[in-house]
Amino acid sequence: MATPTALGLMYWGRKTLQLPERLPAYDRWLRQLWKPAVAVMALGLLGGGRVADWLDDFFLAAVLVLGVFICWQLRTYRPALLVGIGLLPYAVAQLLELLLRLVAPDWMKRQGGLDNVDGLCFMWMGIIFFIARSQHKTQQAEQAHRLAAEQEQRSIESQTQTLEYEVGQRTAALSRQTNELRATLQELQATQDQLIQREKMASLGELTAGIAHEIQNPLNFVNNFADVSAELVAELAEERARPQRDADLEAELLADLRQNLQRISQHGKRASGIVRGMLAHSRQGSGERQPVDVNALCDEYLRLAYHGLRAKDKAFNATLDTNFASGLPPVEAVAGDLGRVLLNLLTNAFYAVQKRQQQGAELGYQPTVRVATAAGHDEVLITVQDNGIGMSADVLQKLFQPFFTTKPVGEGTGLGLSLAHDIITKGHGGTLEVASQVGEGTTFSIQLPQ
């Protein structure tokens, strides 16, 4: 009978092709095929005649077709591909025999079936199965070899860690012999840290002053509109207390009150947005790069630097000229560090135009600070330009050196531009360049990779 052959092929294929691991869903279906197989064999034992024979052959053909389909699903696994090649002729022969039994039963009876074809296909299947089994064993051997290699690699890594530990112990012994030199170096680093902290505090003071001035504007509007709204409420209550109420006046008062509340909400959201922006920058101080909107960052720090200087000098005014490129792609950067660089450059720009204005040597001089952005081929360009006092060629050569400053004693540490240069070049892989002319102004150009 063909049904036991089908069950044998199914059992062998499940084990050889590792179906429980590779195709568990199909494997669950295959394990249920013994039920119809038992039914077909029982029908044959009870003398089912031609129907039992036809069902017996149909079951074998179905198992063969299903086997070819499963092998196609596992075609990237070479033994499965070979098994499919072995099953395919046998499956075609079985399907052809079933078809001929249906359409030409008399011819099949005279020819005695396709036993010869079935025999050849069965032999072909056996040869291919033998090759597939050999390849399966070869792959298992290769897998065992890989596992052995991995174990050897782990052993090597363990030995490497041991050697590294021994090297670390020896390095520690050598380090203990250099304590005197390290003590001197620590003293120098402590002095440098103090100067850097001073520069940070100076930047923080300027930023705080700018934030305070920026928040004060919407808060003033909120307070003013709140006072006016209180007066409107009082007028509305007074009107409602009169014996003869003026409906038009009440509607006008309510409209004014509604408009004031809208303005209070608008300026309150403006102040809240400033606070959220500062909190966002403070949270980004971990050094992790994130996509940054360069246009928004430049606009925000331009206003903060300007208001920070105006908080110290109420009489100072300057023209803020912006030219931000539309559709500028975001830049992967540390927003806090990049904002610190912009704040330093913009603070220096406002300082330069203020000094030129205080000299009073020019009539009609208008302090101007320009900030522009542009997109290059694979970089983003930021330009900070002023029409201030400018710098000489000798100063430009030393501008990014640590502790060099053109400001009077007490107004600068000489670390701001040095740190800004390191943040852009070393921290973000970009460039920071400067061009200046005495009495004409200065231009700083930042180039950041996208």
Image (spheres, rainbow, N blue to C red):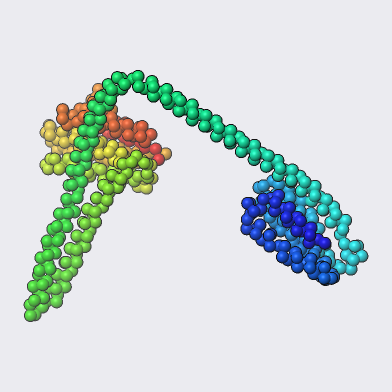
Question: Residue at 15% of width from left, 42% of height from top?
Answer: 310
Q: Which quadrant, please, contains the C terminus?
A: top left
User: Position of 243 compared to 123: left or right?
Assistant: left
x and y, in percent, of residue 406 in the image: 20, 27
Q: Which quadrant, please, contains the N terminus?
A: bottom right
In the displayed structure, would residue 149 be above or below residue 19? above
Which of the 4 quarters of the picture holds residue 448?
Answer: top left
x and y, in percent, of residue 35 in the image: 72, 65
Question: Residue at 83% of width from left, 50% of height from top?
Answer: 123
| Camera-side residue of 20 and 195 | 20
| Camera-side residue of 9 and 260 | 9
x and y, in percent, of residue 243 in the image: 7, 80
Question: Residue at 26% of width from left, 47% of height from top?
Answer: 278
Q: How many marks?
A: 0
Which of the 4 quarters of the picture holds residue 398?
Answer: top left
Which of the 4 quarters of the picture holds residue 230?
Answer: bottom left
Query: Is residue 102 visible from the viewing direction of this image?
Result: no
User: Position of 165 compared to 44: left or right?
Assistant: left
In the displayed structure, would residue 100 be above or below residue 389? below
Question: Residue at 20% of width from left, 43% of height from top?
Answer: 208
Q: Residue furthest bottom?
A: 243
Query: Is residue 83 visible from the viewing direction of this image?
Result: yes
x and y, in percent, of residue 191 in the image: 23, 27
In the displayed structure, would residue 4 be above or below residue 161? below
